[in-house]
Image: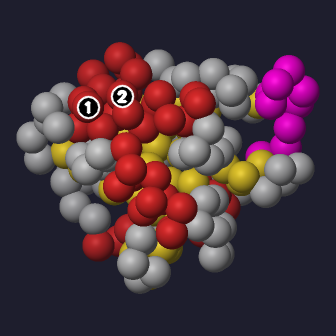
Amino acid sequence: MKVKFQGNEISLEGREIKVGDTAPDFIATDNGLNAINSKDFTGKRAYVSVPSIDTPVCDLEVRKFNEEAAKLNDVKIYVISMDLPFAQGRWCGNEGINAVQTLSDYKDRSFGKEFGTYIKELGLLTRAVFVVDENNKITHVEYCEEVTSEPNYEAALNSLK
C-alpha cells in the first residue's frame, strides 16, 4: 500500500489490516494517563487514526466524527493519535468534543504497530479509519492515500449503521 505525505511517499510500519480480519488488540493511553486495552471494547466501533488532532485537517475530521457519533446509538468512536494525552484532553475540552473518545499511542505505539498506521519517517500515525463490528471483525478499512486529505466519511459512517 502506498501512502503519501504532502506528495512524498512514506513508510508505514506494522501489519496492513483488511476487511474480514479480526481486529487486533492494542493498548493506548486515555486522557487520565490510564492504560486502555482494546480487548475490553465491545459493540460496534470505529478507530479513527490521525496524525495530530491539533492540525486543520484532523480538527475537521474529529469534529465531523464527533457530530456524527452523537447521532449513532450503541456505537463508539475512538480517535487515536501520537498526541500526548494532556494535549488531547485540552483540545477536546476547548473545542467541546465529547461524543468521541481520544486515545494516545505515544507510549508503546501499540495501535500503530497492530493496525499498520505508524509513519516511520515522522513518528506519527497516518490518517486511517477502521470499523469493527460486534463480533470484533473489521467491516471497513480506509488508509488515506494522502495523509493530508480527509477520509471518506460517508463510507465509514455507512459501515457503522
View extreme (bottom): residue: 34
Task: Using residue 78 as the reference point, say whether residue 128 is left or right of it.
Answer: right
Q: Position of residue 119 (x, y in %)?
A: 77, 49
Disc 1 marks a residue whose amino acid type is Glu
Residue 79 in view, yes or no: yes
Q: Position of residue 154 (x, y in %)?
A: 35, 17
Q: Which residue is mark 2?
A: 64
Quadrant of the image occupied by residue 160: top left
Magenta part, dominant SS: strand
Q: Are marks 1 and 2 in contact (CB under 8 Å)?
A: yes
Q: Position of residue 138 (x, y in %)?
A: 40, 43
Q: Quadrant of the C terminus?
A: top left
Quadrant of the image occupied by residue 67: top left
Measuring 39% from the left and 78% from the top, which residue is drawn there? 32
Disc 2 marks a residue whose amino acid type is Lys
Task: Using residue 106 as the reference point, say whether residue 157 is left or right of it.
Answer: left
Which SS class for mark 2?
helix
Badge 1 crowding class, 10 Å Cα cut-off, few under 14, some 14 to 19, many 20 or more, is: some
70 is higher (above) or lower (below) than 137: above
Compare residues 55 and 117 and report the one nearer the observer: 55
Q: Position of residue 82 (x, y in %)?
A: 63, 59
Compare residues 93 and 147 and report the one nearer the observer: 93
| Residue 160, numbered circle | none
Range shown magenta: 4-12
Measuring 79% from the left and 57% from the top, which residue is drawn there? 123
Q: Magenta includes 107?
A: no
Residue 137 in view, yes or no: no
View extreme (left): residue: 73
For the image, the number of numbered tags is: 2
Q: Which residue is mark 1?
A: 67
The colouring scheme, among rainbow, by chain, secondary structure or one colour, is secondary structure
